Amino acid sequence: MSSPAPWNATAAMPADTQPETHLDLRGLKCPLPALKTRKALQAVPSGGLLVVACTDPLAVIDIPALVNQTGHRLEGQAEEAGALVFRIRKA
């Protein structure tokens, strides 16, 4: 009896998984990151993922508030390479 193959993350994903859309808003100041994120979400298909990178410190408040108000889901928030990165799943 052979041992099972190692788990593969891509094999576990459903066939209809949407690709990620990336939005680089580094250098923009409030309220532009939130406004541009709102506009970008309109183009993302339902169930799709929008990854937003920005450097505005107020985005820590503005982006989660936007996601909450619009009914989408914030799947992650982190600081990477000097930028705040938000992973938003469109409802």
Image (cartoon, rainbow, N blue to C red):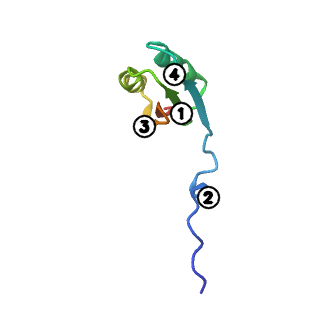
Real-space Cα distance between discs 3 and 4?
16 Å
Residue type, numbered disc 2: Ala
Residue 25, above or below 1: above
Q: Which residue is farthest bottom?
A: 1
Residue 5, image x, y percentages: 60, 72
Mark number displayed over residue 37: 4
Pointer 1 local density, CA inside 10 Å: few below 14, some 14–19, many at least 20: some
User: In what element is the residue under mark 1?
Assistant: strand
Residue visible at 51% across and 21% down? 37
User: In what element is the residue under mark 2?
Assistant: helix
Q: Depth check: 68 or 24 in front?
A: 24
Residue type, numbered disc 4: Thr
Number of callouts: 4
User: In what element is the residue under mark 4?
Assistant: helix
Mark number displayed over residue 51: 1
37 relative to 77 in the view: left or right: right
Nearer the observer: mark 1 or 3; the answer is: 3
Q: Depth check: 55 or 20 in front?
A: 55
Real-space Cα distance between discs 2 and 1?
22 Å
Instruction: First in sequence, mark 3 or 2: give its number.
Output: 2
